[in-house]
Image: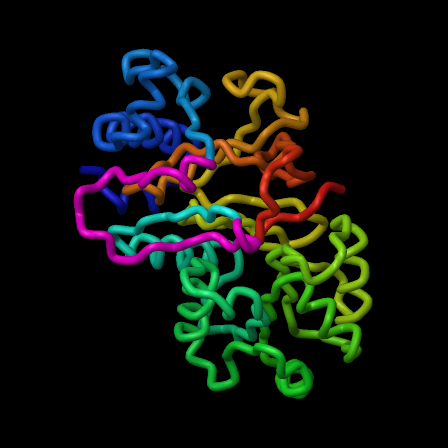
Amino acid sequence: MIDLNSIFNIKTEEEFNKKALEVFKFQFENNRVYRSFCDLLNKTPSDIRSIEDIPFLPIQFFKTHNILSSNETIETTFSSSGTTGTITSKHHITDLSIYNASFKRAFKQFYGSIEDYVVLALLPSYLERKGSSLIHMVDSLITQSKQPESGFYLNNLTELRDTLTKIDSEGKKVLLIGVSFALLDLVETHQFNLKNTIVMETGGMKGRRKELIRNELHQILKTGFGVSVIHSEYGMTELLSQAYSKGNGIFNCPNWMKIITRDTEDPLTIQKTGKTGGLNIIDLANINSCSFIATQDLGRIKSDNSFEVIGRFDHSDIRGCNLMAL
């Protein structure tokens, strides 16, 4: 078994690389679907010398297979959003406490203690369906905040305006997290001049509005909320970790998560830093499913290991937590 504390306590790149190779061996031996995928590529643990050698499972497999590295009972299943008639991804979770530990530790790494914030959530499209990993995360953050004003808002935008204006003016630290189309709805009907609020968008128009490039979206939101930057969260159903941006669409990962890019023409070839490629994600918290996922997102990695999401592969599904191309 893999020691979870050793995953969440990773401090250096050397520790990450060593643990990733250990997790690969574990999942090769315990994940039937991933093992079959690696066999097709003629890849075994003896062939893997670095994280660049590890095969990345195409994210579409979560739509057609049960991706599990554990024989334990499934505790819950997260599902992706999708339009009518589309097949959604399913992420079976055998130990929900790992997800809880992952998002709590990641939030603390980037923003400090959640107890310091009032958490206001504007996530109507996610609240209107079951199985959202984002709703589970935000609901837990609301509970952990221990602030009486924290809570979800569906269509009651006037109530949200009043609450947000009041607590921001009182000097309390506020996290307003919302899906893009709902945040746009809010600033179209109400204007703000916020001083103590982090506005964080999770991406996604969910078919409610025309897709916007990130710069245009963020400019509208900055003007409407009266803030200098818009923060962003990058996560998805198939992961148990999230990356965060504190502005300009530049994301950073928690210490147990890493992004590398693959050649858009050759999915088995890793791209150099600075070149646009498909995003491959290593999420070591995904110990009981698959930690090595080839997404349908396009992006670039910077020299400091931060990254930006710049679009999607043609014909890939519209994902709820991603942004359209710049």
Q: Number of labelled discs?
A: 0
Q: Could you say which is closer to the camera, residue 249 or residue 131?
A: 131
Answer with the quarter of the image where residue 115 lies: bottom left
Residue 107 coordinates in the image, percent (x, y): 47, 58
Residue 147 coordinates in the image, percent (x, y): 47, 81
Q: How is the image coloured?
A: rainbow
Predominant SS of the magenta segment: loop
Describe residue 85's horizontal placement relative to residue 63 as left or right. right
Q: Could you say which is closer to the camera, residue 26 or residue 88?
A: 88
Residue 186 coordinates in the image, percent (x, y): 72, 74
Describe residue 101's horizontal placement relative to residue 174 as left or right. left
Confirm whether the magenta stretch covers residue 131: no
Look at the image and tell me whether residue 193 can be seen: yes
Q: Answer above or below: position of 123 versus 297.
A: below
Answer with the quarter of the image where residue 188 lies: bottom right
Look at the image and give the residue range highlighted in magenta. Answer: 60-85
Q: Could you say which is closer to the camera, residue 16 or residue 318?
A: 318
| Residue at the image point whose x is 42% and y is 54% from the top | 79
| Residue at the image point whose x is 49% and y is 73% from the top | 116
| Residue at the image point whose x is 77% and y is 64% from the top | 222
Residue 173 coordinates in the image, percent (x, y): 58, 75
Q: Answer above or below: position of 183 versus 57.
A: below
Describe residue 51's horizontal placement relative to residue 46 as left or right. right
Q: Could you say which is closer to the camera, residue 255 or residue 91?
A: 91
